[in-house]
Every structure is written in structure tokens, then in C-alpha cells.
Amino acid sequence: MAQRTQRTQRTAIIIGAGPAGLTAAYEMLTRTDIKPIVLELSSHMGGIARTVNYKGNRIDIGGHRFFSKSDRVMDWWNRVMPIQGEPSVERATGAVALSYHGKSRTLEVRPDGPDPAREDIVMLVRSRLSRIYFLRKFFNYPLTLDVATAKNLGIMRLARIGTTYLAARLRPRPEHSLEDFFINRFGTELYETFFRDYTEKVWGVACSEIKPEWGAQRVKGLSITSVLLHAARKLLASEKSIAQKDIETSLIERFLYPKYGPGQMWDLVAEKIKQRGGEILPEHTVERLELSKNRIVAVTARDNATGERKRFCGDYVFSTMPVKELFDNMEGDVPSDVRRVAGELQYRDFMTVGLLVTKLKLNTQRQEPVLDNWIYIQEPDVKVGRLQIFNNWSPYMVSDPSKIWLGLEYFCNEGDALWTMTDEAFAKFAIAELAKIDIIDAHEVVDHTVIRVPKTYPSYTGSYDEFHTVRAFADRIENLFLIGRNGMHRYNNQDHSMLTAMTAIDNLLAGRIGKDNIWDINTEDDYHEEKTDPESAAAE
């Protein structure tokens, strides 16, 4: 086994090259004298925020809007990829004269900004449209109380929605489960119509078995009241802003998006890390972490290509790997209850089917283009959960603009009936489901591919109630920082994951030992955003 122990400067071992791991590495190189060594299991950068290129057609796994309430994150992204100029605004986005107002600066869509038709390193300004597909009809997402919604639902269901919402507001439930969380904000009828079945598709268990923390992080302040207030603000708005800092996240209407998908951002960041002297080692599986006297003294990883095992010593360890695997691989004095809780944490896995089609049946039926970025499939007679239309994320995601490039999202458990299907069988299954609900005609499909992503979603089930035991022990390991979605077993978006990395570096620079401020991220609407602008990264 090769051993790398000779060091002339402080080093950090970073496990995982997703948004959190790469942000941590870049922040170290631009703000400290610490050299990062990034160990990545796969051959890709970006984790689930990578872009998969299939014959020139690009897949964004899960869909990643580049939007954040944090000025710090928005500025960070913009330093890596500038916002497009006025030319070549491919879809009506209101992009001309849009501005992003931070606390101390303004970033504008300027006439001299890069033209996406001529330059590749550019952030597009995109309009957000996502709807619910239910009863073979479209509903606005979030729901709006308008004539179309009333017609789709029918007067009786609409009346039940109103009365059960009022009942929930008058007598809210104690929130012991996600079901309680939803009913308190939307009422029983709306919950059962639009939230229950889809959420149970995602997690594979009843909402009554899921902890309410999931709703607190993902839905936050969204409710019928907030939807009505948002509609009123739209009528009064005099300016269209990319930042939209005071708008509930689920209601954001514009966002930034890399020309070739989210993986383009993280590939660029990885290159900057290497240019500045950091190391990134893809296809390296972490197999061992040596714990001694409240410190991780070494990390051993296997080179998947050669089989060689390498031992890395570092001053710090930043982990974005699943907590379950972290403690499976940790050798040393770990209490039995910590190992048990970590070992019983659960995850939800994910499959995407990319379909290239000549046209959508929906377009023909409605005689209008379908402009959605993604569509929530609420139909109970199919297993598909969401439908991405990648042309609408960026027209450069599809190689032939005359074709439509779709992503069908399925939530499953590794080893279950869906996961174990062959790629060909699963693609046929997905095509049949989309045809069944009248979105495509099967004969319009010209190509397909299948992508499996294990441990995509840390689950708020299993031993999650006892996760505080694991967190408390991990926080006592002086040089270990848990960051990112799987690293913290928390359903973070990529901006939250980035902020956990930035905050960990802030702590190192400030000599702060406590890690509570890292865990505080994504527990409140404003993400605990700093009131000043800390030196988040050196200017390029």
C-alpha cells in the first residue's frame, strides 16, 4: 500500500467532488494556505449536480436551478460563469434589463455580456415553469386559486379544499410527521389530492412515517397564504429580479443556468482547483478512516483503476460521503450506539430515463408548446415521479433542436424491482408509462438511455430520530467536518451544500471550534446569511 505522509504544508482530505467538496477545495485555495486533496468515487465532477452527455444530449440529474437567497453563493457562481448578455435570449424570459441586487453590488444582464450563441462559458437567464399533471390535466405549481384550477378540480372538491384548510388553520395538529406538516399548511383535502401520493412515490413510505423536518427544509414557508401574497406582489412588482430574495423558494420564477447544464459549472471549478495546485483523484473509493484521540489521522482509498490502496494523512478531513458509509469505514473508538444509528440510516435511490422524441402528444392535443422545465406527475396509476424537458432548461442540452429530450425520474430502493430491471426493460417500461398518461406516443421515441444514482436522497426515516447521537460524536472529532447533502444526512440543495463548505472554511480561519453554525444552514428561510460580505473567494 502506497503511503503519502510527507507534507510541507497543511493539507485537507476532502471526500467527494460534489458541490460541497469542490467548494471547500476552492475556498481553501483562495482563502487559506491549506492544500486540498479531493477523493472522488466516480469519474465525474459535481456529484448529482453533474451533467451526463449521451450522444450530445445532456441530462441534468434531478434538475438544478442556479438560484439562492444567499448573495455569497450567487456572487460565487457568477465569478465562475458570467451571466449572458442581451443577445441570444432563446426564450421569453424578461432577461433584458434583469438585475441581481446584492447588498453591496448589482450584477446585470448587460449588452456586453457573453452571447451564448458564440461563447460556451456563460450562465443563461431562464424562466421557471413547472406544473402538476393530474387527472390528465395541468395544474399550476404552486397551485393558484384561479378559474382554470377551479374548473379542473370541480366545485365539490374545491369546496372541500376550502373547508378543510380553514379547519386546519383553526385547529392545527401537533407536528409529529410530514403528514401533519402538510395538513397544517394546506388542509386535508389539498394534502390528499396533491401532496400525499407524490411524496409517497418519492420516499416509498407513508407521509405519516416521515419526520416533519423534511417539510421544514423543502417546503419552508409555502402555504395557501404565501401563494396569495406572492400573487399580490406580482401585480405590484415594478422590477424583475434574478435574486428574488424575499420570495419563497418554491415560487421563484427566474433562475440562472449554465449553458451545458450544472456539470459545466463543476467541471470548471475542478479545473480551477487543479490550476491553483489542488489535487483531485477520481475513481478513488474511500475504504478506511483512522480515528485516534478525537482526530482522523489518515484516510485510505483504493484506486479503482489499478486496485492500489493509498494512505493519505492530512490536517483536516471534509466528508461528503453518506454518513452510513463514513462510519462503516471508521476504525477506532466509536461508541456502539453511534455505529448502530449510522448503520440504520436510510436512503432513497434514483433512476433517470432519457428519452429522445420527435414530438410530445401534449403539444398536439393542446396546440401549444409545453414550456415547463419539469412536470410533477401526480397520476397514481404510474410510478414515474417527475418529467424533465431539458430543451426548456437550456436549448443547448439537446443536439438536434427539432427533437425533444426528456428525463423521466423514478424513485426507488437499490435492489428493488425497478432498480434490478435491465436497462432495455426499464426503458420500455418508462416509455409505456408516459404513453399511458397521454404525454407521448410510443412510436415517437427515437433513442433512450438509463442512469442509476444510489443514495440520492438521505431519508428522514429509519434511525433519523436518533441522528443527533451521530452528529454529537462527529462534532467532537476535532478535524472532521461533515458537509453537503449526504455528508450531513440532510436534504440540501446545492447552494446549501456550498454554504456548509464555505462556513466550515470560515470556522478554520476564525479559529472557531464549534460546528453548530454549519448545521444551522438550511434550517431557516434566510439560510442564516451573513449580513456582511465575507471573503468568499478571491476574484478571478
Image (cartoon, grey):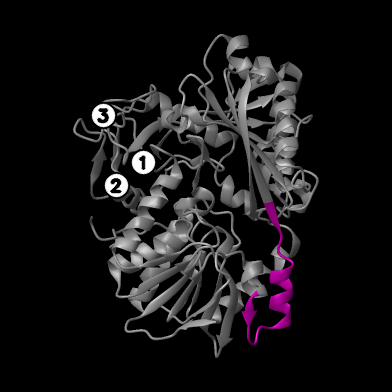
Nearer the N terminus, badge 3 or badge 1?
Answer: 3
Question: Splitting the image into 4 quarters, where does residue 378 fall?
Answer: top right
- The answer, for residue 461, to whether it is visible in the render is yes
Q: Is residue 139 magenta?
A: no
Query: What's the amino acid at mark 3?
Result: Ala
x and y, in percent, of residue 281 in the image: 46, 65
Residue 243 tag number = 1
Determine whether 476 is above or below 65 in the image. Answer: below
Residue at disc 3, secondary structure: loop
Mark 1, other Cα within 10 Å: few <14 / some 14–19 / many ≥20 = many
User: Which range is magenta?
Assistant: 329-348
Instruction: Look at 63% across and 83% down and name the residue there.
Output: 331
Q: Nearer the viewer, residue 105 or 389?
A: 389
Q: Indicate the position of residue 171 as horizontal and vertical percent values.
A: 72, 43
Q: Is residue 469 visible?
A: no
How far, Cα to Cα, is label 1 from label 2? 8 Å
Identify residue type, mark 1: Ala
Mark 3 to mark 1 CA distance (whole Å): 13 Å
Q: CA distance from mark 3 to mark 2?
A: 16 Å
Camera-nearest residue between 71 and 260? 260
Q: Which residue is mark 2?
A: 102
Quick check: 189 above or below 526? above
User: Which mark, by number, is residue 97?
Assistant: 3
Please indicate whether residue 299 sits to the left or right of residue 324 in the image. left
Q: Secondary structure at mark 1?
A: loop
Q: Residue at x 55, y 91 (%)?
A: 293
Give the camera-side residue of 262 and 337. Answer: 262
